[in-house]
Image (tube, coloured by chain):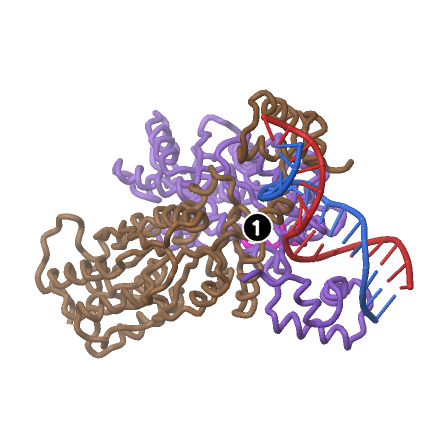
Chain colours: A brown, B purple, C blue, D red
Amino acid sequence: MTRTTIADVAREAGVTKATVSHALSGNRPISSETRDRVLAAVERLNWVPSQSARALATSRANALAVVLARDPEVIANDSFFPAFIAGVESVLAPTETALILQVVPDRAAEERAYRALSRGRADGTLLLDLRTEDWRVPFLAELSLPTVLVGAYDQPTGFSCVRTDDAAPVREIVAKLRADGHERIAHVSGPLDYVHSKARAEAYVEAVGSVELLREGDFSAASGRTLTAELLALSSRPSAILYSNDTMAIAGLSYARSQGLSIPRDLAISGFDDDHLSAHLSPTLTSVSSDPAARGRAAARLLQADILGAEPRTEIVDCNVVHFRESTGSTASATPTVSRRTP
Amino acid sequence: MTRTTIADVAREAGVTKATVSHALSGNRPISSETRDRVLAAVERLNWVPSQSARALATSRANALAVVLARDPEVIANDSFFPAFIAGVESVLAPTETALILQVVPDRAAEERAYRALSRGRADGTLLLDLRTEDWRVPFLAELSLPTVLVGAYDQPTGFSCVRTDDAAPVREIVAKLRADGHERIAHVSGPLDYVHSKARAEAYVEAVGSVELLREGDFSAASGRTLTAELLALSSRPSAILYSNDTMAIAGLSYARSQGLSIPRDLAISGFDDDHLSAHLSPTLTSVSSDPAARGRAAARLLQADILGAEPRTEIVDCNVVHFRESTGSTASATPTVSRRTP
DNA sequence: GTGAAAGCGCTAACAT
DNA sequence: ATGTTAGCGCTTTCAC
């Protein structure tokens, strides 16, 4: 049984391949009568155009791509990614555009992946996990593969960009902790070459005026634990720790408890990303929700526009909202208690 | 600037396109000298073969696909999916095979998506969220699109399948609760037309010998809450509830508490899927971990084998392990307390 | 061991 | 408004 092609449909409808093609694309006027006949034939034969043939002929893959250079294990415990993808899909689905997900082990493979994408696999790509001076930015520019940056990239580029203000929530949390009487506030960041980690860390440093209590983690539970141990071992230890994600915050919280500290009495803790279970922990975890789905939607729309030839533009999606919960001792309307930090 | 093609490489190396093609594929003997020259030219020109041209010529897309008919919002809160995808990617990455993710709103779109996949977009597909008598099984068989079923499908098929024993952990939990003195044990299931929900529910019914306390949820927090309320309003209410995922369990737990019940004293609770934060909740949540990554790896391997022409086979990946935690009042080695349930 | 040429199934000029 | 035809960039017979 050989696959049915556009030629079969043309024969069935008594027209030529060109007519079939145009009847479907609407790229040239067709008598409604002919169109009906063609559509009927398409229906009858259950024909779906070959994606590869179409891609070859039009140089359009009808697919967008995300390449991740992360360890597969890390993807599994990240609460940002699935929601982001869900957002992307919600704008792609109506267009019948596919999303290609490719995980690569190293830079060489990543370059090959982007080259392959630009050679017919995809029409554009979304760049996540941006780093300062990210090599992918000039690289993709040279490949002239339509690209949208997701994150507050700190250099000028010719690409569209979906930004978020990561500094504001950090300032807000620090201010609140200050008002609650905390004087030694620490920060466990993500890797500082990630632009979002860096933005948060810089906002922290600016707010507290010192790098003394800044520690660079890697978003893993293990680093959350280790760095918390390090901070708590200080002769003059912090009374509050801001973590750059919930996973590290929870690991830190567990460690602190294991040392006999009570949260938030002896140590206030806040996270980032607001995992959907964070509001159910005990104590409930103060965190920052950032609507990754909205960023996914914005990024997908910008990329589609870019592919259609629109000018690159930067969109600021600011859905960051701080949820003060029990882990900072401060529920919504709690009156700040002065000087409750431990020695 | 026109894209570089195989013809450019051939010219650069002083050979024909055919030789370039074979030098890379190894599909026919090439003098090592010529090969070197070709490879050098490829390197020099940074040439990557066009995926679409290759796909058209070989009818191989070098891509696998997952089509989801879920609401995008649901994807975001599911702890199974990201880990599963991570597993799939870990076997695909070395092969430079792409994973296509497509979310569809309804059945018509889903059929179109599968047709498009089988017409050049992908070489095979992984079927998730299996339902009893799933229409996709015969449909994909007719499309003759290589497929691997993920879940304990209850009909014979010509497809490979990655199974898990969902009944065993349910039996284990019920047995433990019984031993702890619980006599009225309820179950909040997922939609019963999903094969895994059904398997769990059936194991539950068999273990407790009655459907009286079985309620059908939809895996959402909202249904967890509603059905818990319903069960607790019973004149003779359950002293333990098994939920078919952690999200519903946590919603149920919150509701029970809001009614003044203490967990696990007044109500024992267990979940399913073991979200990475479940061990950090308070009380820590009894749940069943199932290593979705391992299932992703197995499914990807089976699909690749299938595409290469191997016989379909069923693989049982049994990594289900029950983690008894505080929410069932039963830490690992706790001695069963008889009759501590509330009236 | 290598070259020449015929497709793969579409789309898009170019005709009429 | 529709038909004819030439590619898109590969792979793969078929010759030599």
Q: Which residues are magenta?
A: B293-303
List x then y, in percent, for residue A48.
63, 35
User: Residue at 55% of width from left, 57% of height from top?
Assistant: A117
Q: Please, what is the three-letter code of the amino acid marked with disc 1?
A: Ser
B230 sits to left or right of B96: left
User: Residue at 76% of width from left, 50% of height from top?
Assistant: B310
Name the main secondary structure of what is drawn in magenta: helix
Q: Which corner quadrant holds the N terminus of chain B?
A: bottom right
User: Residue at 10% of width from left, 56% of height from top?
Assistant: A336
The quarter of the picture where residue D11 lies is bottom right
For residue B123, above or below residue A26: below
List x then y, in percent, for residue A114.
53, 61
List x then y, in percent, for residue C15.
65, 37
Q: Which corner quadrant holds the C terminus of chain B?
A: top left
The quarter of the picture where residue B225 lies is top left
Q: Secondary structure at mark 1?
A: loop
A268 sits to left or right of A195: left
A23 sits to left or right of B246: right
Does residue A25 show up magenta in the picture?
A: no
